[in-house]
Amino acid sequence: MINHHEMDEAKLMEPSEGVVLFHPHIPAKAIEKVTKVLSGRWIGQGPLVDEFEEKFNAEFGKNTKALAVGSGTDALHLAYLLARIKEGDEVIVPVFTCTATNIPFLYMGAKIVFADVDPETMNIDIDHVGRLINDKTRAVVVVHYGGLPCDMDKLQKLTSTHNITIIEDAAHALGATFQGQKIGSISPYTMYSFQAIKHITTGDGGMLLLPEDVYEKAKRLRWFGIDRTAKQMGIWENDIKEVGYKYQMTDISAAMGLAGLEEFAQTLALRRRLFHIYEEKLSEISDVKFMGGGCTDREHAAWMCTILVDRRKNLWQKLRDSAIESGQVHYRNDRYSIFGGSVQGLFPNMDAVEEKYLVLPLHTKMNESNVIRICETIKSGW
């Protein structure tokens, strides 16, 4: 998600004038599919939601069920509820992420315990996680920053001796793999986001891959706690016993999702090609540290391209003067008032990179020439 400050800055630069930081990817078939939905009977949650769930699960899941919802935040909240996190439980979460990862815990009264970043990847520092685990720890949430998977093997070994649930926020990581396994097939709960600028967009939306034994409960929680199948039978025995939410996806959104899924392989291939050009060109510049490259045990999903530089503001201005948008996008959560508003622990790695990270444009409206131009602009100095 773009921070409000970046949104204001973005208004000053129209796409025709340069390279924007993000751009929605809307397949041509999405227009056709949505038009068909709008002329039919189902525009709310209907058969296309079911179809989208089935096809998504077949592509990215393993021994899972897929639940389509209205946003990635909805999916995370449901995952936290289904993992039986309750008031007072401790959850270890990344200090550096979109606030959507952590805000649902405020709904639930769980105790948020921030973990530092790995300075080589900007993912959660698993060594720090190990030092934070105690007998009150109920879950660990990881975010695959920019599209680079965390070291899931190391994390699983760390948590295997405790009754701790791993929940993956894969909002950036559609199509990523770790040791040959697709993200979505490793942990009990994996969330994906279909927000406007993600690999696949449904306008806004999300998907939760979850164990089959909690699927029926998840469907109830998605729709006010109601068993929709029993309700359709018109029986008063259809009692509501759980507090549910209005977290469903609509067929309008699912139509867009299906169109995005059909051409996802091409979308991912383009993003990865641009990402690797960035890696090749920026690695030649001694004053730039390219983040997320060089890993042989995992495949990057190439949602964002992040670099570390000194004098970040100067480079941001240099790029801006060249009609190239850049920004921070995400911020350390421990600084926000809703999470306490002050440092809640020691985060030396986050402190070290806080003034250095910068996100460069990466989306399907770009081509190789755009990336080369950006790299040449950086290479010329700032």
Image (cartoon, rainbow, N blue to C red):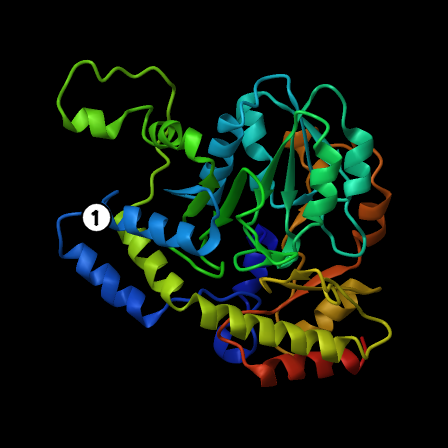
Q: Amino acid at mark 1?
A: Ile
Q: Residue at x 55, y 52 (%)?
A: 1
Q: Which residue is mark 1?
A: 43
The answer to which of 160 and 360 lies nearer the viewer is 160
Q: Is residue 319 left or right of residue 233?
A: right
Q: Position of residue 195 (x, y in %)?
A: 46, 53
Q: Is residue 379 above or below residue 113?
A: below
Q: Is residue 42 above or below residue 270?
A: above
Q: Is residue 145 above or below residue 69?
A: below
Q: Position of residue 152 (x, y in %)?
A: 68, 46
Res. 167 image quadrant: top right
User: Can residue 95 be seen in the rendering of this structure?
Assistant: no
Q: Position of residue 145 (x, y in %)?
A: 65, 53
Disc 1 element:
loop
Q: How many marks?
A: 1
Q: Residue at x 63, y 63 (%)?
A: 299
Quadrant, the C terminus:
bottom right
Q: Position of residue 352 (x, y in %)?
A: 85, 51
Q: Is residue 49 left or right of residue 215?
A: left
Q: Residue at x 59, y 76 (%)?
A: 273
Q: Is residue 124 above or below residue 298?
A: above
Q: Is residue 302 left or right of residue 227?
A: right
User: Can residue 36 be seen in the rendering of this structure?
Assistant: yes
Q: Is residue 265 left or right of residue 6?
A: left
For label 1, the crowd category at 10 Å Cα-Cα, with few meaning under 14, some 14 to 19 and many 20 or more, is: some
Res. 272 image quadrant: bottom right
Res. 217 image quadrant: top left
